[in-house]
Amino acid sequence: MQEIRLGLLGCGTVGGGVVRLLAQNEARLTARVGKKLTVVRALVRDPKKERPSELPASALTTRAEEVLADDSLDVIVEVMGGAEVARDYVLSAIRAKKQVVTANKMLLALHGGELVAEAKKHGVDLAFEASVGGGIPLIRVLRDALASDRISHFAGIINGTSNFILTKMQREGQSFEAALAEAQKRGYAEADPTLDVGGGDAKHKLAVLAMLAFGAQVASDDIPTEGITELEPIDHVLADRFGFVIKPLATGRAHDGTCDLFVHPALVKKDAPLANIGDVMNALALTGEALGPCLLSGRGAGDMPTAVSVVADVLDVARAKVLGVMGQATQALALTPMKPSPRSQANGRYYLRFSVFDRPGVLAKITGALGDRRVSIEQMVQQGGGDADGTAVSVVILTHRANEGDVAAALSVIAAGDFVARPTRLLRVLD
Amino acid sequence: MQEIRLGLLGCGTVGGGVVRLLAQNEARLTARVGKKLTVVRALVRDPKKERPSELPASALTTRAEEVLADDSLDVIVEVMGGAEVARDYVLSAIRAKKQVVTANKMLLALHGGELVAEAKKHGVDLAFEASVGGGIPLIRVLRDALASDRISHFAGIINGTSNFILTKMQREGQSFEAALAEAQKRGYAEADPTLDVGGGDAKHKLAVLAMLAFGAQVASDDIPTEGITELEPIDHVLADRFGFVIKPLATGRAHDGTCDLFVHPALVKKDAPLANIGDVMNALALTGEALGPCLLSGRGAGDMPTAVSVVADVLDVARAKVLGVMGQATQALALTPMKPSPRSQANGRYYLRFSVFDRPGVLAKITGALGDRRVSIEQMVQQGGGDADGTAVSVVILTHRANEGDVAAALSVIAAGDFVARPTRLLRVLD
């Protein structure tokens, strides 16, 4: 074996980036692995489409079995996307005792537990650095650097589209719709942006992070998830007034053998490091028991950053094969099935924006309902109002620390009041 | 060999933290290495001092040769500090074919090239994650995650003491002296703070970063270095007015086979991620050619964060020994001796604070001298003045991009003018 032979499943922009990085850094990578890394097969849909010049035309195939049944291949790199076909292909590669690298967060969120178990059974590695945070080496840091530490909690900005939209709303006063349109114009958002702005993409990535940070195998659909679609410019104005910016977060906390995992927009203090992670940038702020706080940030998407992570993984699994220690890295990943806690058990501070008719006694009713549930008030602002004509005004409350179940109970009492003009907006505060 | 036997050189707070982390995470670490990690020797100065209960009293010795000449040891961990004695011990360990881990930035800055060469010659690894950035996995990320990328430039906050002082000055308007006194009171600064506030500590760390990021072996004394001791509260006020905060930076840029390395306080845009890295936190903002921008931040010092990094390194070198691939990681570190460029060749934007007597024609003289050297002005502010009594006023100029040699030449012309009350303050802008 004079070379490590790679098969690509997919050769779009990420796969093409992988081909180019391997060629451009051939000497350095060969020195690290001890053998040359050669792409010998690449599964594509359209054989006519232009591919990187470094890829020989003979490598292209439209038939998956020419990659999956090729016994000469050492490493399979899955960069095709989608969940179900990718699952079949990756399982087939694992069973054929190939080392596998994937950049596919949806695949991992839906089938990660199964794939890791299968990789352990067959003694191969399943590497997936590129699945979360693009080029930011989140997974490598969680796995290697903090090997002797325990992550107690983390908060991340892991959807670049949502971060771009909230940054535009915050800095330029744009509406959600205008900011989304700009994101689409720039190619940061899909024609159907639901997966990004609805929180589904962040939910998938959070499930992957929970595996690495807490050894938690969760069904991603069990993660309580709120998108950013309901935010209005006034929320940014009011957050600013309280000293915060609104960021699209994915948070995790391990406790008592279970974990809290949430996706939602939240208020972040202006002087916190996450507050300055703007535009399409991603970041993960984690706290290790021994390490203390640590922040990692970078481009969370994009073809070349993702390709850098894929190649770092290829390097790892290729070295493991050369050294005869295939499967050890994945073996060390101990997963325990867990069900994340519901929101009603969460604790924190809350931003509550009430839209109410400006009548005498309304404030007393709101604060009374909150007080009945032991939710105490840190700050309160009334925005607009003073007209006697019955127009709605905004009353915004920042609570002290409270149980979210209690807050929800108080809000449902308030919602029944005849003074309520529009549904109450609840946002969480990152502490 | 049923265990990997460790010898510690030094067992103060970091060494003690290493002992505790190894004990607390024994099962996980054994699973990762395939063998148990056992501390069997620890060199200490005072055998009577209290040590972690996990360390058997029989391991303690005050005689270095009981560690260095013990053929049963696999890994030597140097956490004693200092440069010359540590160099002798580490060289001796390398020549005895031990795997070596060190947390000693001064040792690496002064003797890194020699130690790496010696480790390569004897086929062992020299690991030094803990030498820069405490628990932040900077070195691991530079080495592994970006294996297929090239770092084009970076800017870091790598001295926590200086960052604490500038944060206090900026946020609370304190003088340098008051902020330093508070840092000393809190244990963040030594009684003699010269190495921190004079930039010497950052210079050592920057030399280590240059090895990893650019493969540059530089003499740390060749790095142009300015401390933070000359900053005054008014500089923070004026920086704020231009939209910046002042941060203690170490910067690097690779170009044309050489590199620019500088240590100095600099103006950082308020919305840049580094601007929100406050107090004693450290950070490194780097840009990879493929990856784009990436930020890593955390506690840059402290016993437990540093111990986490030491243990991560111990894990790596122990695994390499178990797998029979000792020395490979260090072999991949190709170093080229380089002399960093002088400041006169740097390019950038500059903040110039002139302290001048408020006489007619002064502004024309200043702007004329700058213009003669092709230094053009982006913004200008005059602070104070209007008195005819000859008191000094501050004139602050933010330049467009210019060559630093030209700026220096213009400043020396201006310095000769009889209107100058005090030396001109020059600060660089991070772009």
Image (spheres, coloured by chain):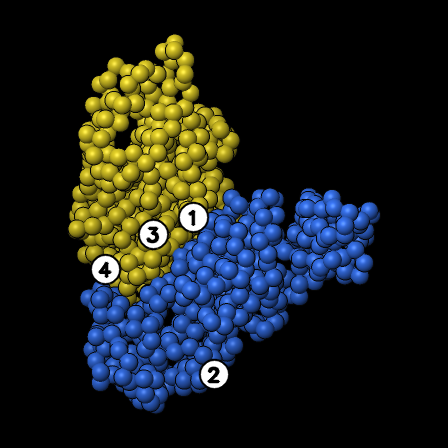
Chain colours: A yellow, B blue
In the picture, the disc for residue B84 is: 2
Query: Which residue is disc 4 drawn over?
Result: A331
Task: Look at the numbered disc 2 and give the secondary structure of its residue.
Answer: helix
> Quick check: A223 left or right of A391?
left
Q: Name the amino acid type tagged 1.
A: Pro
Task: Look at the numbered disc 4 and give the secondary structure of its residue.
Answer: helix
Image point 20% across, 50% down: which residue? A255
Q: Are dots 2 and 4 on a single chain?
A: no
Q: CA distance from mark 2 to mark 3?
A: 37 Å
Relative vertical location of residue A159 with respect to residue A357 in this rendering, above or below: below
Q: State which chain disc 1 sits on.
A: A
Image point 20% across, 34% down: which residue? A374
In the picture, the disc for residue B149 is: none
Task: Look at the numbered disc 3 and give the secondary structure of its residue.
Answer: strand
Percent of width and height locating residue A289: 28, 58
Quarter of the image that includes the N terminus of chain A: bottom left
Q: Name the amino acid type tagged 4.
A: Gln
Q: Name the amino acid type tagged 3.
A: Leu
